Amino acid sequence: MCIRDSRYTGGFGVLELLLADSKIQDVYINSPIGSTPIFVYHQDFEECETNMIPTQADAEAWATRFRLYSGRPLDEANPVLDTELFIPGGRARVAAITRTLSPEGLAFALRRHRERPWTFPLFIKVKMFNPLYAGVMSFIIDGGRSMLIAGGRSSGKTSLLSSIILEIMRRFRIIVQEDTLEIPVSQIRKLGYNIERLKSRSVITRVETELPADEALRTALRLGDSALIIGEVRSIEAQALFEAMRIGALANIVAGTIHGETAYGVFDRVVNDLGVPKTSFKAIDIITICNRLRTPDGLHTFRRVVELTEVRKKWVEDPEEEGGFVRLFEYSAKEDTLKPTETLLYGESFVLNEIAKRVKEWKGNWDRVWDNILLRAKIKETMVEYA
């Protein structure tokens, strides 16, 4: 009884119950509070309507606690609050809105974060991608290249980014920069990784006491030779990031997520929306695209990596028209798997050959490079089979 009382008087009440369920991925509480039930997205049953209807008092209490815990305002002058929620058994990203943005008052959206990081073998098990893709990505990560993970909302971008961190050799230092804490850094740190987290100002809430994303990024570049992981490339920090990559300020892998459905969509967003010069965009080596696909009846969804594209450097205006984008993997809907392209199979990948040039035993010997990739793929596949 005491536990229940503390949950409702000093905690988050029904939200704690929902977030304790590891299969619940999203929680939606719509305005006006008290007139509609809570909706959730469930791992097995997808969109569900619950029998829980919060009261206005519940909503006001949650809003007050979110303000206190985050140190960020939520009022008519600041109608959006973007923060994190940490409770026993669950961790979530919270977006809260109120008047004047929401005419009917308070509303909330919570995305539950997975506590255990995703890994390449786990993704292979759920068919997000196949072992060969894992082998190629492992080779590229060890080669210290730069990459963007793109896709739509809920396509698995951040989860894939977290799994990439676990592919980095533990002897390398890792710096993670986010404006909303989603990557399970604490759990990765417990696995023995040398990892530092930076939190930058949200582009939505604009809390003046927090560093803007571009300043946080420049700080990250001064913290020593490290792999750099950017939670999401959203705004002006993109210019600093691409400029740093272009001049070689990063000596290890750099990876981040961005919204975009295709490689050209990523180019369009980075260059035309975020203002990165076309020359600087060439600093990206690899773009991988995730997507949330639907079954023919439209009732169910599943996540897949649908494309792996390398960015070549000999183009001037439009990489799509001038051969700057070359696909290494393409998704086959018929076989529900990624298929390697001839460019990859025939050893014509610019990025893979650039990595091979730095290793005496691999330079000019594609067969050895390919054998190494296949070995990496076999290791991941074997881990899945034994698990």
Image (cartoon, grey):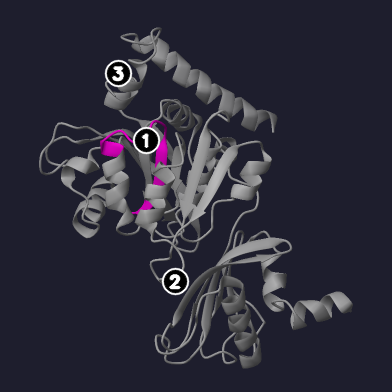
- Quarter of the N terminus within the rendering: bottom right
**Chain part drawn in magenta:** 245-260
**Residue 375 image point, x, y percent:** 52, 18
Compared to 150, does 154 lie above or below? below
Q: Mark 3 and mark 2: span between their CA atoms?
A: 51 Å
**Residue type of the residue flagged with mark 3:** Tyr
**Residue type of the residue flagged with mark 1:** Leu
Residue shown at the point (50%, 60%) measured from the top left: 300
* Mark 3 or 2: the one toward you: 2
**For mark 1, what is the residue?**
250
- Quarter of the C terminus within the rendering: top right
Q: Mark 1 and mark 3: span between their CA atoms?
A: 30 Å
Compared to 290, does 53 lie above or below? below
Q: Residues within 10 Å of mark 3 (few under 14, many from 20)?
A: few
Q: Mark 1 and mark 2: span between their CA atoms?
A: 28 Å
**Residue type of the residue flagged with mark 2:** Val
Q: Nearer the viewer, residue 233 or 289?
A: 233
Which image quadrant is residue 103 in? bottom left
**Residue 162 image point, x, y percent:** 53, 45
Residue shown at the point (43%, 87%) measured from the top left: 102
Q: Nearer the viewer, residue 380 or 8?
A: 8
Residue 305 can be seen in this image: no
**Residue 281 image point, x, y percent:** 23, 43
As drawn, which residue projects farthest toward the right? Answer: 1
Q: Is residue 187 magenta?
A: no
Indicate which disc residue 207 carries.
2
Which image quadrant is residue 93 in? bottom right
**For mark 3, what is the residue?**
346
